[in-house]
Each structure stands twice: as structure tokens, then as C-alpha cells.
Image (cartoon, coloured by chain):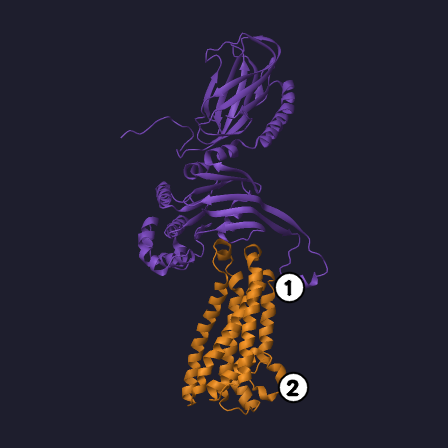
């Protein structure tokens, strides 16, 4: 995946981006995490029907644990990224300390999304297919393969409404380019992730009493 | 202070005629109201369970027992009313929840133990006990898919009882394993009783309910019919639905009568014969409360009443009965002649009772032959195995019949 995208974009499309391999790989890792966490999380309730029906424990554990599973899988991908970092002799700076904050925002975001999706998926089984299409579209609408600067100013605003776009942009700044993340990016991410988590929880708790019956 | 309090509990399920399970269907159907029926699984249930009490729930299939248990366990939510639980609940609704066929016995103990709320340390220290209790020490590293179903159930039960429950909810789980294993389970339950564990117990096995439960709740079609001391409630369950049984007897009567009329002409039939000088009009069974019933607890009293109609004056008739098992083996027979009772003559309508002090059959359906014949064995009316009644087990002995006996060491 990385090789194909790298070849297409750097040679055929003539992308002028410093350390494009790393740029691309970081975007892919973050997007993969989000799509994996939400996909596993979404099916965590429906897929565990026998447990839901027979024993009781807090049902959000299913969703949170699947997000953590996705996180662990991403950790393994990050090892490849670190090897690349060393190979290309990219220096790191103080600003990398901002990366964990971004990561926490991302995790909250994906838990919030997963909670809402998992609950909705119990009621409407086609949510999973709709979400797959969303993820597909999001992959191209998010600055993963390209930099957000390719958009004209007014369009850029719209792209950056997507909190994942901010996550990717900010983490590139801090990890690859040794620059501080923009404060408005961080603010936006923080607020967005809290809002997502909050709304996700409300939807989940609203539908939760019906799980055992509807599943 | 009761550990479980259930107040005015109601649970109803919607049964939609057309289930919308996708967002697409929900969107396309926005303007079409959803049609559904409401099924009331439970209505107005009120009871308390005290700490350390063994509480039984009985009732026919579909009376809402399992729904009630699931609500107590927190799996289903009540539609109305309140359930207060003051201790940790270990639901035990189905054995082996979360068992993975590809993992070994020990790994499955870990998974199952975690689901049932055991700590890591407890699981580790008790794994050997669990395997020993299940009698599966040899198979600790065998994969679960290679286990027989009995072995799996034993493993699940053994794990579950090691969880130190405070409130244990059990749904029909005692009936696993061989006699030996069952005995072990009973010992564990008795230990729980000593330790003050509260148990809510759902079963169709009235024998074990009677043996264990201090108090029992009887449900019928989602309604609370009786609550109280186990023996009384079981009596109510066995004898309680008089209306229904009367209907049944009427049904039986109307079924047999037309058949009989046909037989009158042919005079000989598989199940009824005789010259009809005296006709057996009906046979009814009465329980110990004097109600008509078809179901009896073993060891209870029963009265068999034979209604006859003598069309002319008949001298010296003999009334007799014979009891058959469902397979048709003759178990017992007696008549007035054998008991040295002489009936001088009968005429017109009347009835005769046979009083059974204590039903000595243990369990099963029993067929009854009722006959009236002359001393010369000319049958007036002979109903061969036309009547039946059911006996419900109250002890744990095996077999058809009770033999009064005791062990002396």
C-alpha cells in the first residue's frame, strides 16, 4: 500500500513534500487505527450476542476493549514507522511530547464513534455497510496522501472540519517536522473528541437497555 | 433487609409484525406507522428475597420465569416497576457462556471465571479445584472441542460454583451430570446455605425445588399466582388450576361418550364392553383438597369416584379398578369382591369412591381401567384404560413405585 501510494504520488503526481514516505506512512497509520477501531468496535456488541444475552457486565467494556485492541495493532505498525524515522535520519524535538495528547484525542474520538456505531448497529444492521462507505470516502477526503495546502483557502476550512484531518496534520508537525502543533488545531481536536465521546455515550446509553432484546 | 426487592414489576415485549432491522427500512417506512403486538411477559410481580434464603420460581413453560431471572440479573430491563439488588449477583442462566472450543480446559476456566467475575488470583489458585470437582484433571490441556457435552457442562458448572457468589441465579442447571456429580452439586448448594448465600432457583424439577427452597413463587402466564412456603405453593401448582382441569375432564367425557354410543351398537370395542345394564357415566379424580384434578403429588391422598347409572335393579354388582403404566403393564388391580365388600343391589344413578391414602407411584402417567361386573364375571360395563392421571415426583428415589423402606447402619 505504502509503496504503491508513494510511487504514484511522488513520481507520477510530483508531490513536493519533504520526507514524503514518512508523511504518507503516518497518515496511513492514523487512518488505519481509526477505521479499525470503529469497525471492530461497531461489531463488538452484535458479535458477542451470546454474552450480552447471558451475563451482565457493563456493555461499554466491549467497545472500549476493541478500541484498545486496535490501538495495540497500531503500535506494531508504529514500529515500522520508527524504523523509517531512524533510516531517514529524521531528528526529533521537544515538540514530540505533544504527540501523546494528540493520540489521546484520537483515542477518545474513536471510542466515541465506536460507541455510537456499536449501539446503532444493534438496531440497524446496515449501519456497518454505511460506515464502510464513509470510511472509504473519508480516506480520500482526509489529507493522508496529500498535504492540506493543496486546497484553496476556503476549501481548506471545510477539510479541516474533520477532526481526523487535524489529528494527522498536527501529528506530522510534531513528529516529523519538529514543529509545534498549531494551538487552534489542538483546541479543535480536544473539543471535538470530547463532544464525540459525549454524544457517543449518550447514544450508547440510550440504546443499551434494548440490547438483549434486539440483538 | 431483603437483598432482592421486586416491586410492581412489569415486562412487555413488542412483537412487530414487520421488523425493521436496517436504517434503509427505517427511512423508507417513516410515514408508515409500525404495527406491532405487545406481549406482556410479566405483570405486577412483587416479592422480596431475604439474605441467605433459597427462593424458588416455578411455573409452566412461557410463564415468565426466565424473563424474571434475566431482569434480576440486569440483562433485560423492566418496562415498569423497580428491582433493587443489594449484593453481587452471579447469573447462572446458561452454562459455559463464552466457552471457546479451540482453547484448552484451563484457558476456558480463565475466560469463564473472568466473565463470572472472579479475580485473576482466585482463578489461578482454584483451577486445580475446579478440574478436580469436574473430574477432568486428566484433560486439563485438552481442547474443549474434543470434550463431550457432559464434560463441557461439568467444567462450566464447576467453574461457576467457585465464584463465591453472594446471590446466585440458577436456571435449570442442576440436571447435569451423572448421579455422582449431581450429589456433589447438592453438597455445594448445602454449603452455600450454611455460608448464607442467597439463591434464586428456577426449575421444573419440583422435587429439588421442594427440597431446597424455603419460599417459592408461582408464575402463571406472567402473573404472580402464589408466593409463600414451598410446599403450599407446589400444591397450588400441581392442584391449583382446577378450572382448567375441569374443562379437561369435560372434554374427556364428551370425547368418550359419543364413542360409547357407537359401541353400544356393536357391543364390543377395544376399550369398552359390557351389556350396559349398569353404565359407568364418568370417573373423576379428587385431590387431597377435594378438587377435581388430573395431577397429583406422589404420596398425596387421592379419591377415585366412579359415577354409574343402573338402568335396572342389579343384584350384587362388583366394582373394580386396575392400574396400568403408560406402557400398558398391569401394576395393580382390586375390586369390591377382593376386598370382601358386598353391594346388595343398586338402581338408578349413584357413585362409589375408592380412597387412596397415599399414592405410592413416584412419577409418570398412569392409566386406569374401571369396570362393573357380576359375580360371575359378566361385565356390565368395562372401561379399559380409558382414564389417566399424572403423578409428579416429590422425592429423589428412582423407579415407578415407592417401596416403604429405610436404611439401617
Q: Is residue B12 or residue B331 the one in the foreground?
A: B12
Q: Please provide percent x and percent y for residue B37.
A: 66, 49
Q: Quadrant of the C terminus of chain B?
A: top left
Q: Which residue is mark 2?
A: A154
Q: What colour is chain B?
A: purple
Residue at image position (64%, 85%) is A155
Eye-nearest disc, 2 or 1: 2
Q: Which residue sits furthest right?
A: B31
Q: How many marks?
A: 2
Q: Is residue B102 or residue B302 the one in the foreground?
A: B302
Q: Which residue sits furthest front?
A: B1
Spatial CA distance of label 2 from label 1 is 34 Å
Q: Is residue B342 visible in the rendered structure shown here?
A: yes
Q: Dot 2: within a 10 Å radius of its alpha carbon, few (fewer than 14), some, or many (20 or more) residues?
A: few
Q: Which residue sits furthest left?
A: B409
Q: Please provide percent x and percent y for residue B80.
A: 58, 50
Callout 2 and callout 1 share a chain: no
Q: What colour is chain A?
A: orange
Q: SS for tag 1?
A: helix
Q: SS for tag 2?
A: helix
Residue at image position (64%, 64%) is B23
Residue B23 is marked as: 1
Q: Is residue B311 or residue B300 the one in the foreground?
A: B300
* B14 left or right, relative to B185: right
Residue at image position (54%, 46%) is B7
Mark 2 belongs to chain: A
Residue B135 versus residue B309 in the image, above or below: below
Residue B121 versus residue A107 in the image, above or below: above
Residue A187 versus residue B318 in the image, above or below: below
Q: Please provide percent x and percent y for residue A167.
A: 53, 80
Residue at image position (51%, 72%) is A108
Q: Please provide percent x and percent y for residue B81.
A: 57, 49
Amino acid at each position: 500500500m505504502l509503496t504503491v501510494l508513494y510511487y504514484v504520488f511522488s513520481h507520477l503526481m510530483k508531490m513536493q513534500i519533504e520526507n514524503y514516505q514518512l508523511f504518507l506512512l503516518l497518515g496511513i497509520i492514523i487512518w488505519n487505527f481509526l477505521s479499525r477501531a470503529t469497525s471492530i468496535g461497531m461489531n463488538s456488541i452484535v458479535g458477542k450476542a451470546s454474552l450480552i444475552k447471558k451475563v451482565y457486565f457493563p456493555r461499554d467494556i466491549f467497545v472500549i476493549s476493541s478500541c484498545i485492541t486496535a490501538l495495540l495493532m497500531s503500535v506494531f505498525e508504529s514500529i515500522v514507522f520508527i524504523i523509517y524515522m531512524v533510516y531517514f535520519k529524521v531528528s526529533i524535538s521537544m515538540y514530540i511530547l505533544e504527540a501523546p495528547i494528540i493520540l489521546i484525542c484520537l483515542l477518545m474520538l474513536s471510542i466515541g464513534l465506536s460507541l455510537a456505531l456499536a449501539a446503532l448497529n444493534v438496531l440497524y444492521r446496515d449501519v456497518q455497510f454505511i460506515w464502510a462507505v464513509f470510511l472509504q470516502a473519508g480516506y480520500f477526503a482526509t489529507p493522508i496522501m496529500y498535504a492540506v495546502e493543496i486546497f484553496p483557502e476556503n476549501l481548506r476550512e471545510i477539510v479541516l472540519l474533520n477532526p481526523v484531518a487535524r489529528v494527522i496534520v498536527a501529528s506530522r508537525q510534531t513528529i516529523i517536522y519538529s514543529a509545534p502543533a498549531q494551538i487552534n488545531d489542538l483546541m479543535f481536536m480536544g473539543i471535538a473528541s470530547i463532544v464525540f465521546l459525549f454524544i457517543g455515550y449518550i447514544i450508547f446509553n440510550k440504546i443499551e437497555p434494548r440490547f438483549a432484546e434486539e440483538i | 433487609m431483603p437483598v432482592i426487592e421486586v416491586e410492581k414489576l412489569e415486562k412487555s415485549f413488542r412483537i412487530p409484525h414487520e421488523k425493521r432491522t436496517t436504517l434503509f427500512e427505517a427511512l423508507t417506512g417513516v410515514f408508515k406507522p409500525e404495527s406491532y403486538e405487545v406481549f406482556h411477559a410479566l405483570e405486577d410481580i412483587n416479592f422480596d428475597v431475604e439474605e441467605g434464603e433459597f427462593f424458588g420460581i416455578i411455573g409452566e413453560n412461557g410463564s415468565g420465569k426466565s424473563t424474571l431471572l434475566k431482569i434480576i440479573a440486569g440483562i433485560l430491563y423492566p418496562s415498569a416497576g423497580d428491582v433493587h439488588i443489594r449484593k453481587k449477583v452471579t447469573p447462572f442462566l446458561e452454562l459455559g457462556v463464552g466457552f471457546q472450543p479451540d482453547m484448552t480446559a484451563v484457558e476456558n476456566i480463565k475466560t469463564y471465571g473472568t466473565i463470572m467475575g472472579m479475580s485473576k488470583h482466585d482463578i489461578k489458585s482454584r483451577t486445580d479445584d475446579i478440574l478436580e470437582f469436574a473430574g477432568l484433571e486428566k484433560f486439563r490441556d485438552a481442547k474443549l472441542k474434543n470434550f463431550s457435552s457432559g464434560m463441557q457442562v461439568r467444567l462450566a458448572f464447576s467453574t461457576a460454583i467457585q465464584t463465591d457468589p453472594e446471590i446466585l441465579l440458577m436456571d435449570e442447571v442442576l440436571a447435569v451430570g451423572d448421579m455422582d456429580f449431581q450429589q456433589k452439586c447438592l453438597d455445594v448448594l448445602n454449603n452455600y446455605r450454611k455460608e448464607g448465600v442467597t439463591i434464586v432457583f428456577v426449575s421444573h424439577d419440583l422435587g429439588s425445588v421442594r427440597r431446597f427452597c424455603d419460599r417459592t413463587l408461582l408464575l402463571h402466564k406472567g402473573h404472580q399466582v402464589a408466593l409463600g412456603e414451598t410446599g403450599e405453593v407446589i400444591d397450588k401448582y400441581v392442584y391449583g388450576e382446577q378450572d382448567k382441569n375441569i374443562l379437561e375432564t369435560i372434554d374427556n367425557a364428551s370425547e368418550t361418550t359419543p364413542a360409547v354410543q357407537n359401541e353400544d351398537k356393536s357391543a364390543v370395542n377395544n376399550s369398552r364392553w359390557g351389556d350396559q345394564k349398569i353404565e359407568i357415566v364418568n370417573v373423576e379424580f379428587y385431590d387431597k383438597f377435594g378438587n377435581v384434578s388430573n395431577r397429583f403429588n406422589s404420596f398425596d391422598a387421592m379419591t377415585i369416584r366412579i359415577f354409574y347409572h343402573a338402568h335396572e335393579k342389579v343384584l350384587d354388582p362388583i366394582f373394580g379398578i386396575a392400574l396400568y403404566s403408560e406402557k400398558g403393564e398391569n401394576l395393580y388391580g382390586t375390586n369390591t369382591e377382593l376386598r370382601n365388600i358386598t353391594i346388595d343391589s343398586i338402581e338408578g344413578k349413584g357413585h362409589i369412591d375408592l380412597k387412596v391414602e397415599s399414592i405410592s407411584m413416584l412419577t409418570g402417567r398412569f392409566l386406569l381401567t374401571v369396570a362393573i361386573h357380576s359375580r360371575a364375571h359378566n361385565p356390565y360395563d368395562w372401561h379399559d384404560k380409558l382414564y389417566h392421571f399424572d403423578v409428579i415426583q416429590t422425592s429423589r428415589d428412582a423407579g415407578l413405585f415407592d417401596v416403604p423402606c429405610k436404611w439401617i447402619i
